[in-house]
Amino acid sequence: MGDLFTGLRPAAQIDADLAERLPAYTRNEAIVEASNCLYCFDAPCMVACPTSIDIPGFIKLIQTDDRLGSAQRILEQNILGSSCARVCAVEELCEQACVLAPHEGPIKIGRLQRYATDEVYRDPNGFARAGLVSGAPTGRSVAVVGGGPAGLASAAELRIAGHDVTIFDRQPELGGLAMYGIIPLREPSEVAQWEASQVIALGATAKVGCEVGVDVSGEELLEQFDAVFLANGAGRRVSSISLVGAEADGVEDALEFIEEIRVQRPSDVPVGRNVVIVGAGNTAMDAATIAARLGADVVTCVYRRTQGEMTGYPDEYEHCLKDGVRFRWLTQPVRVLTDDTGHVSGLECRVVVLGEPDIDGRPRPTVTDDVVVIDCDHVLLATGQLREPGLYERFGLDVEWDRPKMTGPFHTSDPRVFAGGDAVLSGKELSVVDAVAQGRDAARAIDAYLEDHA
C-alpha cells in the first residue's frame, strides 16, 4: 500500500511494545492471590463464565500448590483455557461477578487461570497430561468447517467422544480469531498454535488452505461425513458503511491490518503517520493500539455514537487512552478524500445527534449537515464483519438474517448440519470464550444425534 511507512520506530522497540501485556504470576504470587478467594458455594463467577469453569475449584487447587490439577479442572470445561485466560473480558464476566469486587477488588481470575494452564502450555503432550484423550472409536465421522475457537472446541470434544473429525479451514494455520484477529499484546500467536496442535494430537485431521464452497463442496462433505458442524465465523470482510471513496489507496480493513501483525514482523507492517480508525469495538481498539505502537504520530477513532454505546471493552479503551489514541464521538464518516496520487488525505464526516433507541436498545444516530474534515493518510475500517450466507446456501440450508436459520440449539434446517460460534452469535457474544462454549456444546448435540442415528 503506497505512501505508508515502516521503520517509524526501532524494530526491537516495536517488538517489545507488542509483547504480552501482563507478566505471568510467579508461584508465590499465584498462591497468595488464590488464598484471597472465598471459594463461594454457587459461586457467581462460575455463573458469569460462558464455559462454566469451576473457578473456586481450580483456584483452591492453586492454593494447595496442585498446578496440574488446576489446569485439568479448567481444560475439562474449556479446552482453550490458555487463550481465554489472556483474552477473556474478565472485567465484565467472572471478575465483575466476584463477591469481593465491590470491596477490596475481585480475585484476579484471568491471571490465575493463565498460571494454571501454563503448567501444560508448550508441552507437546499437554492435553494428555491434563487427562484429555481420545475416546474409543465409534466409526462415525464429522466435518468441522472452520478451525477457530468454536471449531477447535467441537473437534476436541468430538474426538474425546471417539468420532473421526476433519477440520477444514481456508487459512494456512488453525486458530481463527485467536490466531489471526487478536493482537500479540493480548495473546501471542504461540498460544493459539499450541492449542491447535493439541487438538490434532487428540487425533483430529486438519485440511488447511482448503475453503469449503471453493476447494470442496458442501455436497461432498455431506456425502463423506455423518454430520457437519459449521464454525466458519462471522465473515472475513468488513461491513459496508456507504463510505464514498472507500476503495482509495490507504483505506484498509482493520482485521486485515491486525492479521498482518500476526503473519509478519510488526516493524515490517506499513502504517500512516496520521491514522483514523472507523469504529469503537474491540477490533477498532486493537487496530488503534497497533497503529500507535508502530509509530503513528496521531491515531483517532471516530464513532457515530458515544462512549456509552461503544462495544469495545472498557479495559481496552483505557489502554488506548494511555497510548495517546484520540476519540471523536458522534461523528459519521461519509467520504474519503484523496490527493493527486489517489492516496487518502482526509476523511469527510458529518456530526451526529442521537435519538430514540433502536431495536438493540441503543440511541439511534441521525446524521446532520454539519461537516467535519479529519486529516489522515491511513484509514482502518472496523465497522463489523460482513456475513456471507453463500456457504449456507451451498449446503441447501434455510437462511435468516445472513445466518443459518436455526431450528433448535445448534440445529439447522438440515438435521445433519449443525452451526455455532460466531456464525450464529452477535454483539458482545462475538468472543473467544462464547465461541468455545458453543463449540463444546454443539459437539455434545452432534454426539447425541449420531448416537440416535447409529
Image: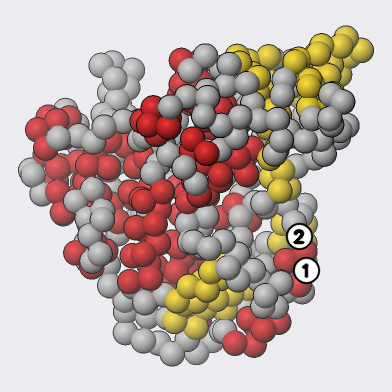
Residue 376 placement (x, y as % from top left): 72, 20
Q: Is residue 355 above or below residue 111?
A: above
* Residue at the disc numbered 2: 389
- Identity, as a three-letter code, of the amino acid under mark 2: Pro
* Residue at the disc numbered 1: 393
Label 2 SS: loop
Image point 44% across, 82% down: which residue?
164
Image point 38% across, 44% down: which residue?
188
Image point 31% across, 37% down: which residue?
110
Q: Is residue 67 above or below residue 194?
A: above
Q: Is residue 430 visible?
A: yes
Residue 217 placement (x, y as % from top left): 70, 78
Question: Circles 1 and 2: CB distance less than 8 Å?
Answer: yes
Residue 449 placement (x, y as % from top left): 53, 78
Label 1 SS: helix
Image point 49% across, 46% down: which residue?
264
- Identity, as a three-letter code, of the amino acid under mark 1: Glu
Q: How many marks?
A: 2
Q: Is residue 56 visible?
A: no
Please identify the residue farthest to the right as the structure is shown.
Answer: 369
Q: Is residue 32 above or below residue 388?
A: above
Residue nearer the viewer, 76 or 225: 225
Q: Badge 1: few (under 14), some or many (20 or more) residues near its Cα, within 10 Å?
A: some
Residue nearer the viewer, 412 or 160: 160
